[in-house]
Image: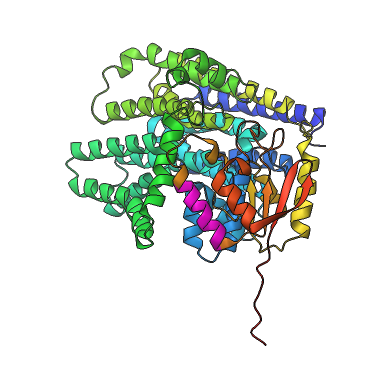
Amino acid sequence: MVYNFYFKAFLFIIFFLSSLWVYRGYIQNPDRKLSGQNAALGLVAMLLMVWAVRLPFLREREHDIDTSTWLSAVIAINHYPDKLWTLLNYTDARPLTVFPLLAGSWVGMPVGYGSAEIIGLVLWTGTVLLLFQICKLVGGRSLGLVVTWSLAVFLATICHIFAAYNSEHSSIFMVTAGVTLFFLYIYRRWTSRAVAVATGILLGSLIYAKFQNAPMGLLTGAFLLFSMAGRKDWANAGALLLGCLLPTLFVNVFYGLRGKVDVFWNNYFWNYFYYSFTTQFSSMPIAERFSPGRVIRFIFYATSSGIYVFTLSALAVALPVITFKKWRSGVGEQGIALAFSFLLLLLSIYAVLQSGNNFEHYKLFLFVPLLIFNAFFLARSQPVVRKFAIGFLLLGGVLQTAVNLRYLDRDVAYDPRTETDRKVVGHIQKHSRASDPVVVWGWRDGLLVSSQRPMGYRDVHTFHFSMKSPLIPNWTEDFLEDMEENKPKIFVEAMIRNYSERGDLFLPHDKVPVVREYVRKHYRLVSELDGVKIFHRKEVPTISLLR
């Protein structure tokens, strides 16, 4: 019923009328001092609407292969006894992306795609609440509700590629939390050293959710330190710096005690340095990644978000020009807040474009910085300007909702790989126990999620071995170490054309000499299903002690 045209038309009418009500309520009395209780009721109603619309459309299937990566990590962490080591090493260097899913499994949520989407929605709920706090500081509660409403309308019908849990969900929540703490300090809402340390820990932890967060974390920390220096608040500045260093200090000590500091730096820093600043993964030249043509094609030309991004971007260009006389004299802490908002927006665009990969989920980074930047200028615009700008903002959100509802369907395009998945998963479940580790050589992470088997090698996808990277010797050492320690029961060769993600580009295991020899020595081929080869580990003969 929820996919019925008439039901979706009903939802659109609700969104349209609600947006119209929000618009009229604000425009008729823009300077009304909204009470905290009424603002809280508005936020609750807004978030309940998001949840009520999203929950019926949950689907228990993979919409983004990255979701399978994080779910596979949860299965591995719950399996292996050394939880912290597994959390740090079996999560593709993003333990704080996996941790919310892990926490969900601890409270009884199944390790699956529907649960992951719910956890992503929980993080978006937190982000909306934090965004309201920022907008309230910048322009008051009424403006805060209007701005967050536009995001809520977008989130309610967000496309499945955005809804599928990914590293952006935890990253955006954490970045927004850090930005909120910055604005709270600017507006003199906290002075505690404990809060400064906690803020530093948060900012220092951002890279453990996603390496692309690093510029935004550094910017927030730098502006906080600058503001503290301006107030001669040296105690809090020291506490903030200490907090920023603690996460990486802790992790280095942890790895150092095991004699594995090089493993940390290779997998957490150098791997993502080469990913972002070279053409090892993306062949797109560095200069072309920031070209106007790519910006238009990648950011604006998309049914999933194009109208909403265009709306926010148009306001971000127009409002500073229209309100120039009001903000050009901004000095002191207001000027600091303005400069920070502008640079945060630039860095969010940088985070989307830097790697040269046109992954849709990268664009999630844009919405919160754009809304903060626009809120700053909406609060300083003339009433007549604000009237048209807010109308344009809400109209863009409603039009995007219409597009999203139109393409919201129960079914997805037929994928011929699904039948092969069924066969391979059936074999894994028949010939192994839930506690038996499995290695999938390829980029087909969902096999481990569907079979609910822990990964036997710390990288659930093995495309790294196909790159011309100086880190291959280190990855090879990790592979051999994990295979010897975990002794995976089954090894699946899935890196084949039209089955594995980019299977036509990356190397099968028998093209990697060290891996080929290890598999030849320790495994035997037992089955081939639609070209996917399945190997079982050879039984080690036991020597009887009885003569």
Q: Is residue 439 left or right of residue 100?
A: right
- Image coords of residue 120 (percent x, y): 58, 44
135 and 299: which is toward the camera: 299
Q: Is residue 261 above or below residue 418?
A: below
User: Magenta segment, principal secondary structure?
Assistant: helix
- Image coords of residue 250 (percent x, y): 35, 56
Residue lying furthest left: 232
Q: How many marks?
A: 0
- Image coords of residue 318 (percent x, y): 44, 13
Q: Does residue 146 appear in the picture of this structure?
A: no
480 and 225: which is toward the camera: 480
Q: Does residue 62 appear in the picture of this structure?
A: yes
- Does 306 lie within the magenta span? no
Q: Is residue 315 left or right of residue 227?
A: right
From the image, which quarter does the C terminus lie in?
bottom right
- Image coords of residue 246 (percent x, y): 32, 53
Q: Is residue 2 above or below residue 208?
A: above
Residue lying furthest bottom: 547
- In which image quadrant can residue 324 be found? top left
Q: Is residue 398 left or right of residue 34?
A: right
Q: What residue is rendered at 26% in x and 47% in y? A: 241
354 and 349: which is toward the camera: 354
297 and 48: which is toward the camera: 297
* Stretch in magenta: 474-485
- Does 480 lie within the magenta span? yes
Q: What residue is rendered at 54% in x and 66% in y? A: 81
- In which image quadrant can residue 392 be found? top right
From the image, which quarter does the N terminus lie in?
top right
Q: What residue is rendered at 75% in x and 57% in y? A: 429
